[in-house]
Image (cartoon, rainbow, N blue to C red):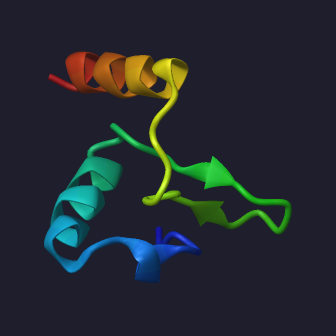
Amino acid sequence: MTFSDQQQISEYARAAVKSMQQAGIINGIKNADDSYRFQPLSNATRAEAATMIYNMLISK
């Protein structure tokens, strides 16, 4: 999956974001047009962080 805001993800972080997405740790936020965004310029909410940690733990 390619995030609709992919160009805003810093070059150094793109490989990590791609790996986490492929591992199912992150999914992005669904847009109205059924695409997904990553929102790299925003902080994760507590719920989003908890979901990422949970997804990481169950994927092991």
Q: Position of residue 24 (x, y in %)?
A: 36, 41
Q: Is residue 52 above or below residue 3?
A: above
Q: Is residue 14 above or below residue 49?
A: below
| Residue at (30% x, 21% y) in the render | 53
In the rendered structure, the answer to whether residue 33 lies left or right of residue 9 reads right
Q: Which of 50/24 is in front?
A: 50
In the rendered structure, the answer to whether residue 36 lies left or right of residue 28 reads right
Residue at the outermost bottom position: 7
| Residue at (43% x, 59% y) in the render | 40
Q: Quadrant of residue 14?
A: bottom left
Q: Which of 58/31 is in front?
A: 31
Q: Is residue 22 above or below residue 2?
A: above
In the rendered structure, the answer to whether residue 51 lies left or right of residue 23 reads right
Q: Position of residue 3 (x, y in %)?
A: 51, 69
Q: Position of residue 43 (x, y in %)?
A: 45, 41
Q: Position of residue 47 (x, y in %)?
A: 53, 19
Work out which quarter of the rendered image holds the C terminus and state it.
Answer: top left
